[in-house]
Amino acid sequence: MAAHDAFYPLPDSLLSFILTKMPIKDAVKSSVLSKRWRFLYTQMSDLTFSPTLVLGPDSPSLNSLLVSRLENIISNILLLHSHNLEAFHLHNNGFDHNQRRFSRENVCKWVRHASRCNIQHLTLSDHHVPALFCECCRALKETPPPALFSCSRLVTLYLYDYSLTSIPDNFDGFPCLITCRLKNVRLTDESLVSFISLCPLLQKLEITADDLLGNVVIFSSTIEHLHMQHARSLSVNCPKLKIMSGLMCGDLIVNGVRFYEFSSVIWHLEMDHGSTLRELSMDFSVAKFSTSRFLHIVGNCQTLKELVIYLGDIREIKMDAPLLNLFHMLPNLQRLHIMGSFLLECARDPIPDCLAFPHVNLKKIRVEVLEFDSKEIAAISCLLQSMPSLETMEIRLPDEDDEGRCMNFFKDILYLRRASLLARIIVLECTPNDYEDIPHWED
């Protein structure tokens, strides 16, 4: 029989690795194949448990009997592991908040055992409260199992829907932690700062608090990627910082760079060497500002190489300066992506044939046409004749039923003169999904 078994020559370590790529329910079923496979699943180094993975997607509503059965299954699988456990992912979700859930006693027991097995990658998801958070719902959130704070080998940690408003006094920190995600976690300003200070190697940190934080000060000599939401003010002092996202804070200071009233519209930024701003993404669709103030703030970021802006329909803003001055204010810009009424706003002022100071560094630009207006064509023509290094201009058209109108506009664009012989014009149809997630350039 061994001659016909394709898995026979493979070592147990490789077979257990293959089992980790299967749902835990199917991996355990492999124990009936032969004596060799009987306890092979106990060597799996990566375990993921959730109600649907263990009981199946068509399992009935969880009652006390099913929950008890499920807890026994998880205990039997997990406690057979000794010192070979690398990853443990427990998703205590899929429950209605009125139904029975995993007992805290069992969750604590599982995490305690994972700690003894020198766990390196841990996920604890306790999502069981309604989506609309009220104060009484937040009160339902439990603190993480105490054994979590004894997992000294953790490299990655993902906490979902727990309360981390206080840090145990005897907690010595996570000396190996590199990546941490705190999603829908209840925090305080003090507990967050304390937690970060106890992670000396932390490089990637994602924080989505379930309530608005106050004045948060983050200091770390190691953090490179930071995702932060829900704070009245945020001051970041991270010399190695490369990427920040999910911001929209009331007041934002990043390595000494202050963004003033534009703090609330920034959702992504990237930096070189800690304090040199390289990429910036902003959403002005709900902001009230004047073009002169906008140009002044953006003009202070002359090191910018990429700028992404969602303007929306801003025809009610105070147009006290030509938007085309943006190119003069950012001489180092290489990539520009502006969604919304940028071309129409440029058309409010007399449009020159080309800019007084050609932009020699800009290589890629995205703009959006809204009304197929002749002035929009004039603005596009001005840009094409003012960018001698341009490689690609992407023009997004609205979802227009009149194909003839689109075709005529397309022909008018293709015949425009260009300062760069290498410039390509790409015309695409704009769909509603374009506004859900504004993409970045891909090389």
Image (cartoon, helix red, strand yellow):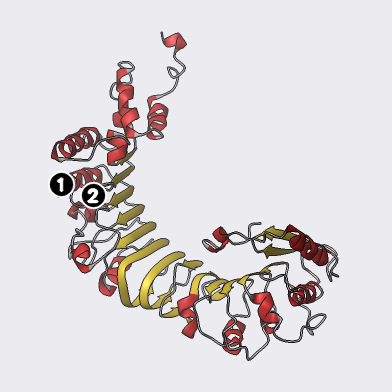
Q: For the residue carrying disc 2, how many other residues have a C-alpha within 10 Å: few (<14), some (14-19), or many (20+)? A: some
* Quadrant in which residue 190 is drawn: bottom left
Q: Nearer the viewer, residue 236 or 252?
A: 252
Q: Which mark is in front, 1 or 2? A: 2
| Quadrant that contains the C terminus | bottom right
The residue under the point 32% across, 58% down is 175
Q: Nearer the viewer, residue 13 or 265?
A: 265
The residue under the point 35% across, 56% down is 177
Horizontal and vertical percent position of residue 172: 24, 61
Q: For the residue carrying disc 1, how many other residues have a C-alpha within 10 Å: few (<14), some (14-19), or many (20+)? A: few
- Label 1 with label 2: CB-CB less than 8 Å: no
Horizontal and vertical percent position of residue 117: 26, 42
The dot on residue 303 is: none
| Quadrant that contains the N terminus | top left
Identify the residue position indicated by label 1 in the image.
103
Q: Let me know if residue 380 appears in the view.
A: yes
- Secondary element under disc 1, as helix, strand or loop, is loop
Identify the residue position indicated by label 2 in the image.
96
- Secondary element under disc 2, as helix, strand or loop, is loop
Q: Is residue 298 left or right of residue 389?
A: left
Q: Is residue 339 above or below residue 106?
A: below
Type of the residue with mark 1: Ser
Q: Is residue 156 left or right of residue 411?
A: left
Q: Is residue 324 left or right of residue 434?
A: right
Question: Mark 1 or 2 closer to N-term?
Answer: 2
Type of the residue with mark 2: Asp
| Mark 1–mark 2 distance (CA, rounded to whole Å) | 15 Å
Q: Is residue 336 left or right of residue 20?
A: right
The residue under the point 58% across, 89% down is 318
* Quadrant in which residue 50 is drawn: top left
Horizontal and vertical percent position of residue 174: 30, 58
